Amino acid sequence: MKVICTSFEARPRTVPAGSRVFTYFQGSDIAGSDRIANGWMPELEREGYAPSTPIWDFVLFGFAVCAADIAVPRNTSPDGWTRQIELSVTLLDPDRWNAQRPLIEGMLRILTGDFWSVSFLPDGPEAPQAQRSICDRDCVALLSGGLDSLIGGIDAIANKRRPIFVSQLAYEDSERQRTYAAALGGAAWHQQWSHRIDPIAPREPSTRARSMGFYALAVLATSLLTTPAPAEILVPENGFISVNPPLLPGRMASLSTRTTHPLFMEQLQLLLNAVGVPAVLSMPYRFKTKGEMMRECLDQTLLARFASDSTSCGRFRTYNRTHCGRCVPCMVRRAAFLRWGRPDGTPYKFANLQQSEKSAADDPMAVACAVLATERNGIDAFLGATLSFAGQGDRANYRDVAGRALSELAALLKQDGVL
């Protein structure tokens, strides 16, 4: 399917057959078209944004990827999953981006598991040109409302960093994000936005590209900094979830999310460099388990105050904004609390992994199989070629963090009587 993301001025006069058209920042007068970030420009100007062309084009690109990911259904593809997406985006400097098409298409292939064809056209929407505020911040930090980002924020403040906290508005987490930013002394510079992509047609729920919206907002926030370039963007994610090794052979490719996968992050950094965005993506916990992050957090009192309130569940909406307790992210979370050694006050729909309902035991079974396979044959046999993306030095570190994470999960499975 072709997806066109365009400025209002460059919009097509009709929606081409078999295509989806999105206009930036205002509704189109073309029947059947959708919108991205409707009404956002005045808000950006009030906040003092005046981003450079490379930064603004990256924001447009990130939002366009999110729009295509939401608008193109997987269930109509031949295998029910892998899509062919043709994405056209209007930018201010399209030539620089067209020169990077192979890099971009390969990067998106890693992220979503789909086949992408991208092209960039002129006449993108102009960037906001507000009077910049005086900013005393020295980096940007993602703040999602999750446990890893909470720890990342706590540690940044403990290390005397002064981050602009960036959040994507989410119905379940928006108030939580504001609470954390305030507790960390960053409420005045907390940037909390949404891409406001709401297509008329049914949405594709898998949203494997959702992180591109988050990175777009983080890159935008770097334009507020007055510290010397390049700006540092802190991406707090534990190493096991970042690599997200397939627990079973059937969980290969995009069936496992890759929002912070090291190979994707490497490609994303190459893209930032190539298009002139002066920002460095930093992943300080890429060789840590979630349990280690909790044990080593630099303010244990603040962590204890908010840890059980944070979110991790992959099915949070399914159970009315309650952690299910048995999806992979929930199991990694529960195992981390065990490793931390403090009480887990998180309300779980299923507090024990042996509790089940029809067709709901897949994730505990997959984790149990991974743990048993590792105990029987070793971590290298379990990982197989999963770490082939990494250089020799990093490969050893990723191997070790995977082994330690599986040990944390084994303790949880034994506690609940699964093993």
Image (tube, helix red, strand yellow):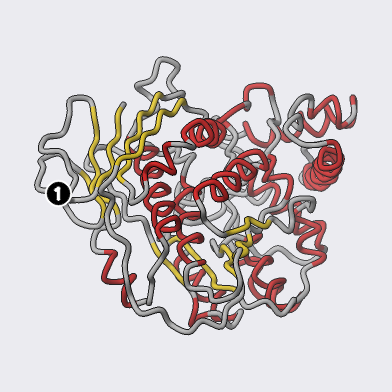
Q: Who is closer to the viewer here, 218 or 142?
A: 218
Residue 147 placement: quadrant: bottom right
- Residue found at x 53% / y 35%: 103
| Residue 255 in the image, given as x and y percentages of width and height | 56, 30
Q: What's the residue type where badge 1 is placed?
A: Ser
Within-10-Å neighbours for mark 1: few <14, some 14–19, many 20+? many
Would residue 62 be visible to someone looking at this image?
A: yes
Residue 296 placement: quadrant: bottom right
User: In screen coordinates, is 54 left or right of 414?
Assistant: left
Residue 362 placement: quadrant: top right
Q: Which residue is mark 1?
A: 28
417 to 377, vertically: above or below: below
| Residue 71 in the image, given as x and y percentages of width and height | 32, 37
User: In screen coordinates, is 325 left or right of 379?
Assistant: left
User: In screen coordinates, is 43 left or right of 112?
Assistant: left
Q: Quadrant of the N terminus?
A: top left
Would residue 410 be visible to someone looking at this image?
A: no
**Across the whole image, how many numbered discs are drawn on residues?**
1
Dot 1 lies on which element? loop
| Residue 350 in the image, given as x and y percentages of width and height | 61, 48
418 to 49, vertically: above or below: above
